[in-house]
Structures are given as C-alpha cells and as structure tokens.
Amino acid sequence: MRVKIVTAIYQVGWKDITFFCENVRIVAGINPNIGFVVYTNNKDRLKKYFASIENIKVVTREVEDFHCYDSVKQSFNLLNDYQKSVRFGNLKYLCLMHEKANFVSENESLYVYWMDAHLLSHILLPEMYMGRGFDLTKLAVQKMKIFKIPHAGNLHGVDMSKFGTELYDGKYMIGGFWGGACQIVGEFLNDYGPKAEMMLQNNCFGTDENVFTLISNDFDRSLIKEYNFEQWYHQDTRLWKHDISSPMDPNLVSFSDVFAKNFLEEFRYWEKEHV
C-alpha cells in the first residue's frame, strides 16, 4: 500500500494492552487503503483483535531483541531521580520509545508514519472526531510531518538548553505521530544515532522526544511541515490516572484541533462553535 502506519503494542507494566488493541482495530478498520504494521511481544493475544482486519500485519519482537536494547541498557544509569520517578524508569518502556526509529526504518513504503497506539482515543481526540478516516491527500506528500508544542524548562528531565538555541528553540517534537515520504523520513532517522550519542556525551539520556527535537532543528527545513499546538487536552478528555495535566484552556490550541483539521476526512473545524 502507498501509505503505511507503524505502531507497537507492548505490555510494559503500566496499562493493559486491550486499550491499545481496540484503538488500532478501529482505526485500521475504517482506513482499508492504509497498511498497518503492529510490533508486539504478544502476537497470539493481538490475533483475536485483528483477525478480521486484512490491512494489519503483526510482527513479533521481544524487547531484548530491539536494536536499541543494549545501548539503552548501558545508558540507564544516566537517568536522574525525576526520570526514575515516572515511566522512563522502566527499562522496557524506555527501550520501546527509542526503538520507534528502527521500527519505521525497516518498513518501506511510499509514505510511512509512526503513530502511538493510543493516539486515536478520547484522551487526545474529542468524541465528535472519532470514527473518521484519514485524509490520504494529507498523508501522501513529499514532506516530513511533525508536531511541536512549546515547553519551558527541562524536557523529560533533560536540560535542553545545554545544546544551544540552534538545536532547541523552546519547542519539542512529539514522538506520538510523525512521518511522510519514505525517503525523507529515512534521511531524518539517519541522524537518530548521532543525536542520541550527543546526549550521552553531555551526560544525559532522555526519551525519543529529546532526540527527535534535536534532529528536527538540525534538519533541512524545506523538507519539514511543522504543526504547532499549545495543549494536549480538550473539553471531554478522559484522563488516565497516570497523566499529569493542567485544566483545558479554551484560549489555547489543542492537539486534537490541529490533528483533526489537517489529517481527518470530512472535518468541519469547530463546527459546533463556528456555525
């Protein structure tokens, strides 16, 4: 298929995978012209969710077999107390975030995207946006599409200012959704190893979002389409107990507004508020 979406569903100790399976099943079912590749360490369990969905391919891979496993394990002692107090202190979870680049790199297609399995949920999209297909005209373009959000202070426990304003401009690239033309995505991901090594040389180790942020500010800007938002949550967000969030501010642009307007079919921007 011309467009491929890559994701992963792993049990890493903080959320039952049923939630993620259901999200992917719904999204793949209403987007039959998009190929979905799902990495997991529990293929048998996923089969019962995806048996009737022809455009989903399930790939089994244990965390210990990840390309990044050894390097992440060796760097684990660089985590600070803050990082250990949140999910990043879970070695398997941290490996899963850093392996995204490798998952995508080995899946060739004309257009390839990474999408976190929980992305299309009531947590990030209001109910009025659910059940809509992707706008393929927006996915199949010769750009690397990324989302960024302003962020002051440390990013996932890492002081990004040490890398200078050229590599950190006060916004970070989210790791939940990105991609575009396969060749451009490949060029972007070629810099993942060097940028991760740069962090280690500065005696710090963060998440995929730290690394992606450094790459995005050092990449050919003519090849990037950047979408900016100001807050994650929206009017009917259903928070997980693990989420740390501030109240929804109606004056700020939410991720769901930008995502739905630019990537979902038949979307009427704020149709209830702007008739």
Image: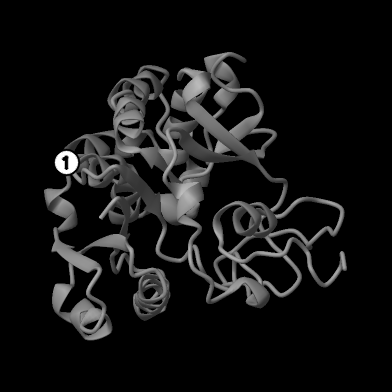
Q: Position of residue 256 (x, y in %)?
A: 65, 59
Q: Residue at x 67, y 33 (%)?
A: 153
> Label 1 amino acid?
His
Q: How is the image coloured?
A: one colour
Foreground residue among 14 and 3: 3
Looking at the image, is 158 positioned above or below residue 17? above
Q: Position of residue 168 (x, y in %)?
A: 58, 22
Looking at the rendered image, the quarter that the N terminus falls into is bottom left
Q: Is residue 70 visible?
A: yes
Looking at the image, is 165 positioned above or below residue 225? above
Q: Quadrant of residue 44?
A: bottom left
Horizontal relation, residue 216 to residue 239: left or right: left
Q: Position of residue 162 (x, y in %)?
A: 55, 17
Foreground residue among 197 and 119: 119
The residue that mark 1 highlights is 67
Foreground residue among 29 and 122: 29
Q: Position of residue 13 (x, y in %)?
A: 34, 68
Q: Quadrant of residue 172?
A: top right
Q: Residue at x 49, y 53 (%)?
A: 85
**Dot 1 surroundings within 10 Å: few (below 14), some, or many (20 or more)?**
some
Horizontal relation, residue 125 to residue 22: left or right: right
Looking at the image, is 252 positioned above or below residue 121? above
Q: Is residue 207 visible?
A: no
Looking at the rendered image, the quarter that the C terminus falls into is bottom right
Q: Residue at x 42, y 74 (%)?
A: 30
Q: Residue at x 41, y 77 (%)?
A: 26
Query: Which secondary structure, mark 1?
Result: loop
Horizontal relation, residue 110 to residue 22: left or right: left
